[in-house]
Image (cartoon, grey):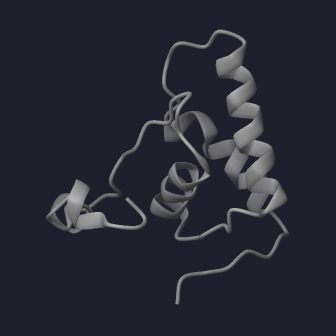
Amino acid sequence: MNKFWPMYAPFDVPKLLGRPLELSLTKDSGLAGLIFLIKGHTQVKFHKDDPRLQGLHAQLNTEFEAGRQTAVEWEEIAGRVELLLEGTHVSSPG
């Protein structure tokens, strides 16, 4: 979705609904999906090579490898993301 938004959502869904487009993370989700989810809720865009982002992604992958069957929703990782953002510098939109 980061690369070609119209293929997945031909309308400006966040603007139409007045809220971010929701995305669930699964065992097949990559760093780009995590970046999309974080940016949609915080307006902060991590880079794929950011070690904090990679660490969170690795934690999620470990959960799936251990047998997790349910998708990860924003509400579950919001606190973890907040900790990543505290006192750190990442690129802001603009």
Q: How many marks?
A: 0
* Quadrant location of the N terminus in the rendered image: bottom left
Q: Which residue is the extreme one toward the top?
A: 67
Query: In this orientation, which residue lies closer to the viewer: 94 or 51?
Result: 51
* Left or right of residue 33, residue 84 in this image: right
Query: Which of the 4 quarters of the picture holds residue 2?
Result: bottom left
- Percent coordinates x, y for residue 79 in the rendering: 68, 43
Name the residue located 14 percent from the left edge and 65 percent from the top edge: 11
Q: Which residue is the extreme one toward the bottom?
A: 94
* Left or right of residue 35, residue 89 in this image: right
Name the residue located 52 percent from the left edge and 64 percent from the top edge: 39
Query: Which of the 4 quarters of the picture holds residue 40?
Result: bottom left
- Percent coordinates x, y for residue 77 in the rendering: 62, 39
Name the residue located 24 percent from the left edge and 54 percent from the top edge: 8
Relative to 87, say whether 19 is above or below.
Answer: above
Query: In this orientation, which residue lies closer to the viewer: 22 or 60?
Result: 60
